[in-house]
Image (cartoon, rainbow, N blue to C red):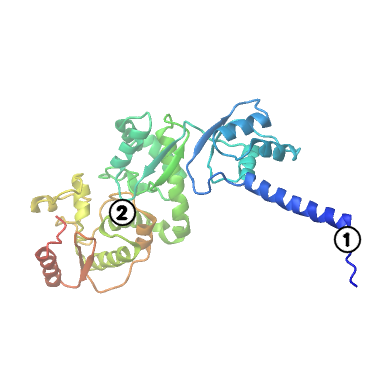
Amino acid sequence: MVVRRRPRPLLIFLVVMGSFLIMLAAVYLYMAGPVDKNNHDLIEVEIPSGTGVTGVAKILKENDLIRNEFVFTITVKSKSDLYLQASTYQFRQDMPMEEIIDCLVKGNSYNPDAISITFKEGERITDYAEVIADATNHTQAEVLNTLNDPAFLEQLRNKYWFLTDSIVQEGIYYPLEGYLAPDTYQFDNQDVSVSTIVETMLDEMASELDPYRTTIEGNVHYYMTMASILELEGTNTENRKMIAGIFQNRLSANMNLGSDVTTYYALQYPMTSDLTSEQFATVNPYNTRASNMGGVMPIGPICNPSLSSLEASIEPSSSNYLYFVADKNGNIYYTSTLEEHEAMVQQIKDRGDWIW
């Protein structure tokens, strides 16, 4: 005869309590999880000064940033050393409750008046002046006046090692052309000074150039000028390096660089249509198509280049090519002789891929 023992009360209690705690933990994890892990939109939330934990929980719940006010409140209060700071925050529904609490404890410097300005690679100083004017309380004329102000330029030359006397030589259109690092920058408000914007961009350029300083410091203006041409002639680091090598070959052979983009800059024309033979022949220290530019670099940069173009100017690819041409699809073709080059141009035109 088998005698079955009755379950011990303590064991039953432990099993029940264990199950309860597991269920409680699961509920807490759900309540403390993100409201919507797939929603990455920013939600601006203001926590007024003097708001208690309960009030903060209510504000967050009203904005669908937490699942449960009570769970938020007891979580914060269970950690006696926490202090939630009043401020304006930007939260997302994909943030777990603990992450939101951490932000509230740290506080933030979110500024609703802050502005963001994006400066694109390959654009000119005049384009940048327009971008600044659109984003701030300055006119385009005010921006350009600051950029060309002799006293300001002298101050900058004393501060940044890569700004040499070459930027203020006679014939230069805009001294800082080529030296303002393209990027997206944040500023406090629309009243930000032009000098602050410029120095922020130059600080970024200093960071980008620092790894190459020992290589380029003796002739930095050459590298910045070359990089600016490569920016507009090439489409990626690889073909820009190839073009840089071709330009070096042409300079060594006392040939013109023959870069059309320098002519557009010399004339201050947008690159939206073809130029005439007379325009390409214009004598100008920027125009490398002019007859007097054999073996000569343009007087200065023609746009503000990317880091990719700077790297290409420093590390050109070696080849025997002397010519290159691009079609309207961005494909670049390299040749060694003028006859080969002219034949390639005709092939591109015949198949309807000429750029204009």
Judge whether 106 appears above or below 345 on screen. above
In the picture, the quarter occupied by the C terminus is bottom left
- Res 161 seen here: no
Residue 122 sits above or below residue 215 on the image: above
**Quarter containing the N terminus:** bottom right
* Three-letter residue code for mark 1: Arg
Q: Secondary structure at mark 1?
A: loop
Give the side of residue 329 with respect to residue 203, left or right: left
**Residue 227 rendering spot, x and y as whole percentages:** 33, 56
The residue labelled by disc 1 is: 6
- Per the image, the residue denoted by label 2 is 228
Residue 72 horizontal/vertical position (percent): 66, 38
Q: Position of residue 50 (x, y in %)?
A: 66, 25
From the viewer's side, name the closer residue of 276 and 257. 276
Q: Choose the circle earlier in sequence order: 1 or 2.
A: 1
Which quadrant of the view contains residue 125? top left
Q: Give the residue type that dot 2 points to.
A: Ser
Q: Is residue 197 left or right of residue 108?
A: left
- Quadrant location of residue 174? top left
Picture coordinates of residue 76, whole percent (x, y) = 70, 38
> Disc 1 vs disc 2: which is toward the camera?
1
Taking 152 as reference, is 214 above or below it? below
Identity of the residue drawn at 24% across and 61% down: 330
Q: Is residue 145 visible?
A: yes
Residue drawn at x 42%, y 32% as measured from the top left: 193
Q: Which element is circle 2 on?
A: helix
